[in-house]
Image (cartoon, helix red, strand yellow):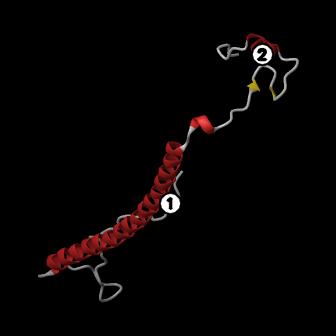
Amino acid sequence: MPFVQRVVTPKYVARSTKPSHSRGAVSLPVQDYELEAITNLTLSNALRQLASLVLISNQIFTELNKELASVSERSLGIKQRIDNLSTRVEEFDPKQVTVLDVCISCSSMGARDGCFWYMFRQSSHSATYNH
């Protein structure tokens, strides 16, 4: 489960408290420019939310860019290691390498006096019989 780094919640953009001039005053009907004031308040609050959303998205993409750069560096390192390994394999001459004579059936190496397959190969003097 991913670790929560940011919580983005919308706010009410059109809610505002109507300033009352006195505590016991009765609210007045809509005055001349009150609807324009509410519209301007709503628009400015929406712009504030969009600005904070832009800042958060900028942080997210900056962190994503750093993580992708890290992945790119690691993959380049792995590619170099694979290239080095492929050049070693290409330079490898299989005729110069000594192969140990290992018996799978008796799990021994070297002199195998009691191994049936070893005695069979020695008596037939043929390398065509594999076990």
Task: Judge the density around disc 1: few (<14), some (14-19), many (≥20) Cα neighbours within 10 Å.
Answer: few
Say whether residue 106 is left or right of residue 98: right
Residue lying furthest front? 125
Q: Which residue is mark 1?
A: 4
Task: Judge the density around disc 2: few (<14), some (14-19), many (≥20) Cα neighbours within 10 Å.
Answer: few
Q: Secondary structure at mark 1?
A: loop
The percent coordinates of residue 91 (x first, y second) are: 52, 45
The percent coordinates of residue 107 (x first, y second) are: 80, 25
Q: Nearer the viewer, residue 78 or 4?
A: 78
Q: Is residue 87 above or below residue 96?
A: below
Say whether residue 53 is left or right of residue 130: left
Distance from the alpha carbon under mark 2 to that under mark 1? 69 Å
Q: Nearer the viewer, residue 75 or 70?
A: 75
In the drawing, what numbered circle is on residue 122?
2
Please tell me how many numbered marks the rendered image carries.
2
Q: Which amino acid type is marked by label 1? A: Val
Residue at 75% over, 23% down: 104
Q: Which amino acid type is marked by label 2? A: Gln
Q: Nearer the viewer, residue 56 or 83?
A: 83
Between disc 2 and disc 1, the foreground one is: 2
The percent coordinates of residue 131 (x first, y second) are: 70, 16
First in sequence: mark 2 vs mark 1? 1
Residue lying furthest left? 32
The image quadrant of residue 125 is: top right
Q: Kindly tell me whether residue 29 is visible in this rendering.
A: no
Q: Nearer the viewer, residue 76 or 20?
A: 76
Q: Kindly tell me whether residue 95 is visible in this rendering.
A: yes
Residue at 64% over, 14% down: 128
Q: Is residue 90 above or below residue 67?
A: above
The percent coordinates of residue 75 (x first, y second) are: 46, 55
Residue at 41% over, 62% down: 64
